[in-house]
């Protein structure tokens, strides 16, 4: 299954200048290929995951973000810090991914060591934790899609 990068979202409570901007040209339009045997993408932080292992968990997006994304000191509490296109207080399916060899994005600043998450937002859209407190929005595409 191939997903096309639709946009990247930043923590709206961030008080410093992040590495990425909203809908950053370095990320927009990139493809991430998810297969049983690998996850691959040619992005600024290259994704090369061989033999991914996936476990699932049901939780709210608010709980997921609070648990795994860097929260700024003295930041006011905000329910949907990334302005995600969903009700962040409703339960969603979260996929925790680790790789037998390689990596599929960050496992820090928080969360299970060696694991990154993908949140199922709908049948054809996912959100994926990315570097520097960024969340990627991806839409499902057919296998012949080009960046």
Image (cartoon, grey):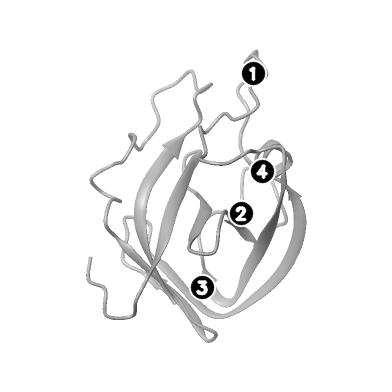
Residue 33 horizontal/vertical position (percent):
41, 74
Task: State how far apart marks 1 and 4 are (Cα).
Answer: 20 Å
| Residue located 55% across and 85% down the image | 36
Badge 3 density bin: few <14, some 14–19, many ≥20, Cα 10 Å: some
59 over 62 or under it: above or below:
below
Badge 4 density bin: few <14, some 14–19, many ≥20, Cα 10 Å: many
117 over 87 or under it: above or below:
below
Sequence-wise, the earlier of marks 1 and 4 is 4
Sequence-wise, the earlier of marks 3 and 4 is 4
Tell me the element at label 4: helix
117 over 36 or under it: above or below:
above
Q: Quadrant of residue 140?
A: bottom left
Task: State how far apart marks 3 and 4 are (Cα).
Answer: 26 Å
For label 1, the residue is: 73
Q: Total marks drawn?
A: 4
**Left or right relative to 59: residue 69:** left
Badge 1 density bin: few <14, some 14–19, many ≥20, Cα 10 Å: few
Tell me the element at label 1: loop
Badge 2 density bin: few <14, some 14–19, many ≥20, Cα 10 Å: many
For label 4, the residue is: 61
For label 2, the residue is: 107
50 over 41 or under it: above or below:
below
Circles 1 and 4, Cβ within 8 Å, touching? The answer is no
Q: Quadrant of the C terminus?
A: bottom left
Circles 4 and 2, Cβ within 8 Å, touching? The answer is no
| Number of the label disc, if any, that sits on residue 102 | 3
Sequence-wise, the earlier of marks 3 and 2 is 3
């Amino acid at each position: 299954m191939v997903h096309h990068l639709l946009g990247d979202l930043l923590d709206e409570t961030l008080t410093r200048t992040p590495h990425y901007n909203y809908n950053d040209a370095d990320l927009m339009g990139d493809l991430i290929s998810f297969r049983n045997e690998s996850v691959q993408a040619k992005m600024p932080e290259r994704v090369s995951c061989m033999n991914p292992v996936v476990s699932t968990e049901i939780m709210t997006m608010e709980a997921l973000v609070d648990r795994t994304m860097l929260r700024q000191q003295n930041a006011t509490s905000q329910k949907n810090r990334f302005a995600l296109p969903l009700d962040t207080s409703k339960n969603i399916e979260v996929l925790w991914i680790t790789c037998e060899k390689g990596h599929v994005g960050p496992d820090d600043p928080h969360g299970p060591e060696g694991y990154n998450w993908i949140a199922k937002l709908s049948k054809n859209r996912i959100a994926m934790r990315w570097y520097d407190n960024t969340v990627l929005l991806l839409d499902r595409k057919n296998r012949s899609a080009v960046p």
